[in-house]
Amino acid sequence: EAQVTQNPRYLITVTGKKLTVTCSQNMNHEYMSWYRQDPGLGLRQIYYSMNVEVTDKGDVPEGYKVSRKEKRNFPLILESPSPNQTSLYFCASSLAGITDTQYFGPGTRLTVL
Amino acid sequence: GEDVEQSLFLSVREGDSSVINCTYTDSSSTYLYWYKQEPGAGLQLLTYIFSNMDMKQDQRLTVLLNKKDKHLSLRIADTQTGDSAIYFCAEITIYNQGGKLIFGQGTELSVKP
């Protein structure tokens, strides 16, 4: 089944403890991105990747890192999480770029205490 | 900058039509989208419209685009309880070699039996 998977789905952590949220797609998509969803703000793009080893900042990249060493994986790294990063995070992928249909993962709900 | 605005809540009775409205600011947007988010799930593409179209119909869904007023609407005919979800309007902004999806805040549709 074609899908985007994220792990973990739920995470509660404390300020400053490094964490990684994984994202994997099995559709051989070139384009992948991360969004955060906050009440009343919709989804905002954090980082995106056009292809392996090509990443770029979105609208709200501060406090986040990403890597794209393989086509299928696009992990989101929070080196030193803070409470303002408490949010619902979505990974998405598409065939080649932003104008192609975006397929979203199920979301990761992160709480930073 | 780019901005997409939606009202936050809409409540309708089962069997009625629902109309969800959206305004956007980027007049160069080539695609405009409607996504549906069911509780605990990621976003699912419902439908989209090219900027050179005025209307698009897909079964119970009708999308109307008024480019002059930068207004997009989604009409759901014969609304069912299964249509209860959050609906996001999104536009594409293209820049340099990339682009991004700009999402509205989401409209929570509640369908009462």
Image (cartoon, coloured by chain):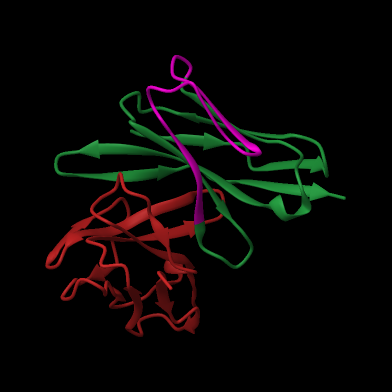
Q: Position of residue A32 (x, y in %)?
A: 28, 61
Residue in view at x 31 percent, y 67 percent: A27
Q: Residue furthest right?
A: B113
Residue in view at x 27 percent, y 59 percent: A47
Determine whether A24 is above or below A18 in the image: above
Is residue B7 found inside the magenta-colored segment of the image?
Answer: no
Residue A79 falls left or right of residue A112: left
Q: Position of residue A1 (x, y in %)?
A: 43, 73
Q: Quadrant of residue B96?
A: top left
**Which residues lie in the magenta part?**
B44-69
Q: Main secondary structure of the magenta part?
A: strand
Q: Residue furthest left?
A: A53
Judging from the image, what is the letter of the chain drawn in green?
A: B
B105 vs B65, nearest the viewer: B65
Q: Position of residue B83 (x, y in %)?
A: 70, 50
A29 vs B26, nearest the viewer: A29
Residue A101 falls left or right of residue B16: left
Is residue B53 found inside the magenta-colored segment of the image?
Answer: yes
Task: From the image, state the color of chain A.
Answer: red
